[in-house]
Image (spheres, rainbow, N blue to C red):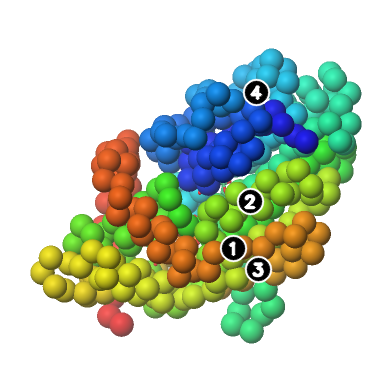
Amino acid sequence: MFNRILVTGGAGFIGSNFIRYILENYPEIDIVNLDLLTYAGSLENLKDLPSQDNYHFIQGDILDQELIQKILREREINGIVHFAAESHVDRSILGPDAFMQTNILGTFSLLESAKKVWLDEKKLGDDDVRFHHISTDEVYGTLAPDDPAFEENTPYAPNSPYAASKASSDHLVRSYTHTYGLPTTLTNCTNNYGPYQFPEKLIPLIILNALDGKDLPIYGDGQQIRDWLYVEDHCEAIWQVLQNGEMGESYCIGGNNQPANLEIIDTICEILDELKPNPEGKPYASQKTFVTDRPGHDRRYAMKIDKIKSELGWEPKHNLKDGLLKTLHWYLAQEDWIDAIHKEKDYQSWVDKNYSKRKETEK
Ligand code: NAD
Ligand code: DAU
């Protein structure tokens, strides 16, 4: 078992859920969380962990090879789960530099460090160590309405600077296995949602804007399709692949939920109308506003999950309605977290930058 794990980016959305999932279900595992605490990472996401006994936080940059090597040696790390990244597509369009630094060079820095400590110094083998890289379905590009869903051997065709930087990092991971024999696994996952997601992303943005009486911005015609996965299901899949996945293999992960954006926004509004009706009696859907589309916006994603299902027995446990209900209940109970996150570094200036120039459009 890989039981001394370095998690990178564990103060972000999925990473913090993953740490909570492990501490709850596998209390014997030691975790070191290395996170730079960029605008997207917050210690607020790690308050009230089930246990702190086997958990250690280090604030640092994945570009810092010396620091990573020190952690690998001193903590005798035998598993790396690499979440740290710049993750928001809109930010990659308005400012791609950080994506190239963190997603490409940061992954390179981790791979180099793992190779040096695990392979060059200690001569560890395939069963001793594992580097698990977290990637996205966006590396496969976009689907036309009748195209078959993405699967592990779909050719890469990334369309945004974010997706291109993730594709580059995936290729680097592959090359370190092929060339040096570094034991890696890789997962490509669809859109996650659930507790602790930063409100720049669609689902938390819609929830919080609705409650604040603000516009609900819909890019283009709102008919873009994503495949939505409840974050806890993703964490379970990562754990399975880390412990039981075949070295050098990649696995596609998805939620089997593929509504159009407009449908998901309407569902959120309907649930909120029930759970916390607007004080003036107006339906939340009346706040929907169509705005200028995202440049290069991918139209449709869908994922085949046959491989992980047949080889590792994983499939999602939550359907979209259950997952959304849990998520909405969570956000409605988190005034302190929301306050803290809204005050995070540059959040308001990001909102102004991304939305102020988007014109309201007729639909
Ligand atoms: P996030 O933006 O919420 O969190 C990213 C975390 O990485 C933050 O805590 C941030 O502080 C940290 N970080 C950024 N740069 C760093 C650096 N140089 N050194 C150390 N830490 C750094 O991201 P997320 O949504 O949790 O996504 C996690 C991973 O999963 C990413 O690799 C992303 O590409 C991938 N992914 C996300 C989704 C999704 O729907 N959110 C879906 C598929 C794959
Ligand atoms: O597919 C996996 C990817 O999902 C991950 O790799 C990314 O890290 C993650 O951010 C997510 O990317 P998306 O671009 O799909 O997520 P986002 O929440 O930004 O947008 C979801 C959809 O909603 C997309 O079609 C754009 C649309 N949208 C988004 C925002 C923020 C809107 O219509 N209005 C908005 O204000």
Q: Amino acid at mark 2?
A: Glu
> How crowded is the residue under tag 2: few (<14 C-alpha within 10 Å), some, or many (20+)?
some
Find numbered disc 4 in the image and state the secondary structure of the residue it sits on. Answer: helix
Q: For mark 4, what is the residue?
A: 68
- Can you tell which of label 3 and label 2 is closer to the viewer? 2
Q: Amino acid at mark 3?
A: Met
Q: Residue 321's quadrant in the figure?
A: bottom left
Image-based side of 275 in relation to 318, left or right: left
Question: Disc 4 or 3, which lies upstream in sequence?
Answer: 4
C-alpha span from label 4 to label 3: 33 Å
Q: For mark 3, what is the residue?
A: 303
The residue at 54%/64% (across/down) is 318
Mark 1 and 2 residues: CB-CB less than 8 Å, in contact?
yes
Numbered marks: total: 4
Q: For mark 2, what is the residue?
A: 236
> How crowded is the residue under tag 3: few (<14 C-alpha within 10 Å), some, or many (20+)?
many
Q: Which mark is residue 29?
A: none
- Front-lying residue, 236 or 345: 236
Image-based side of 335 in relation to 114, left or right: left
Find numbered disc 1 in the image and state the secondary structure of the residue it sits on. Answer: loop
Q: Amino acid at mark 4?
A: Ile
Image coordinates for residue 6, horizontal then vertical, percent: 64, 30
Residue 134 at least partly seen: yes
In the depicted structure, whether residue 53 falls above or below residue 311: above
Q: For mark 1, what is the residue?
A: 317
Image coordinates for residue 160, horizontal then vertical, percent: 55, 58
